[in-house]
């Protein structure tokens, strides 16, 4: 797929789930109740990304509708003077019944990593489901806009897939081989695929 727009991908700022030792082994609750906020460090990360983006002539901002991404998008939009377009297709992976529980339980549900592309957790989605909704999102954006610099604020897995799609990766094996090399952003990290 040849893209008519240039994409900038930003992961939300740090939350207590990336900072606090008692939360690091827990998968965030879904739906977020109470909302998961970004930390002071997370705000600094996003402010730094916004400084970089100020020189990139961003035309549009799209964001996941989760609180941590909306909070991050609000910081960037204020700096850039742009409105934020919320889109549910940019949400994080829905891990179903594993939300709010230990990461270990979710990891043990799969016999190997590539199984996450096809096996769905109860009441959740697999990686192929995420890829499909992101492809749908990109197709809609590409039909509507041309020649724009577009910022997308989302979560780790969705941004990994967006970066891979933009770079032309096709197979699940290609996605897995690139995941932790250059495509999977850390919290508050900006990537330009």
Image: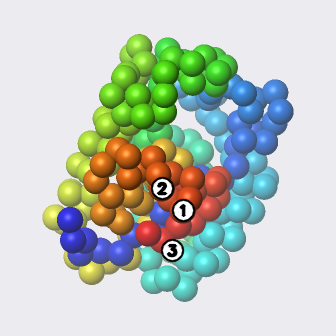
Q: What percent of the width, then of the height, locates residue 73?
A: 54, 58
- Residue under circle 3? 81
- Residue under circle 1? 182
Question: In terms of secondary structure, where does tag 1 sit?
Answer: helix
On the image, which quarter does residue 19 sit in? top right
Could one spot residue 133 in this view of the protein? no
- Residue under circle 2? 178
Question: In terms of secondary structure, where does tag 3 sit?
Answer: loop
Q: Mark 3 vs mark 2: give the one in front.
A: 2
Q: Earlier in the sequence, mark 3 or mark 2?
A: 3
Q: Is residue 126 left or right of residue 192?
A: left
Residue depicted at 65% across the width and 21% down the height: 104
Q: What percent of the width, then of the height, locates residue 76?
A: 57, 66
Q: In this view, does 45 lie above or below 102?
A: below
Q: In this view, does 158 lie above or below 106?
A: below
Mark 3 surroundings within 10 Å by alpha-carbon count, few (fewer than 14), some (14 through 19), many (20 or more): few
Q: In this view, does 42 lie to the left or right of 35?
A: right
Q: Earlier in the sequence, mark 3 or mark 1?
A: 3
Q: What percent of the width, then of the height, locates residue 83?
A: 43, 64
Q: Residue furthest left?
A: 143
CB-based contact (under 8 Å), mark 3 and mark 1: no
Instruction: Give the quarter of the figure containing the N terminus.
Output: bottom left
CB-based contact (under 8 Å), mark 1 and mark 2: yes
On the image, which quarter does residue 116 sit in? top left
Label 3 vs label 2: CA separation? 34 Å
**Residue situated in front as seen by the camera: 50 or 106:** 106
On the image, which quarter does residue 50 sit in? bottom right
Residue depicted at 39% across the width and 70% down the height: 7
Q: Mark 3 vs mark 1: give the one in front.
A: 1
Mark 1 surroundings within 10 Å by alpha-carbon count, few (fewer than 14), some (14 through 19), many (20 or more): few
């Amino acid at each position: 797929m040849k893209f008519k727009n240039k994409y900038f991908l930003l992961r939300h700022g740090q939350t207590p789930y990336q900072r606090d030792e008692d939360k690091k082994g827990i998968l965030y609750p879904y739906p977020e109740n109470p909302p998961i906020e970004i930390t002071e460090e997370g705000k600094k990360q996003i402010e730094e990304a916004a400084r970089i983006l100020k020189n990139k002539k961003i035309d549009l901002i799209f964001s996941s509708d989760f609180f941590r991404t909306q909070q991050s998008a609000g910081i960037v939009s204020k700096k850039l003077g742009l409105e934020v377009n919320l889109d549910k297709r940019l949400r994080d992976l829905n891990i179903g019944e594993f939300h709010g529980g230990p990461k270990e339980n979710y990891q043990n549900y799969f016999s190997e990593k590539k199984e996450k592309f096809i096996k769905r957790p109860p009441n959740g989605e697999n990686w192929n489901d995420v890829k499909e909704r992101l492809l749908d999102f990109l197709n809609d954006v590409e039909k509507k806009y041309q020649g724009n610099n577009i910022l997308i604020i989302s979560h780790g897995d969705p941004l990994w897939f967006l970066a891979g799609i933009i770079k032309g990766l096709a197979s699940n094996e290609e996605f897995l081989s690139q995941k932790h090399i250059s495509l999977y952003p850390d919290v508050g990290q900006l990537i330009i695929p």
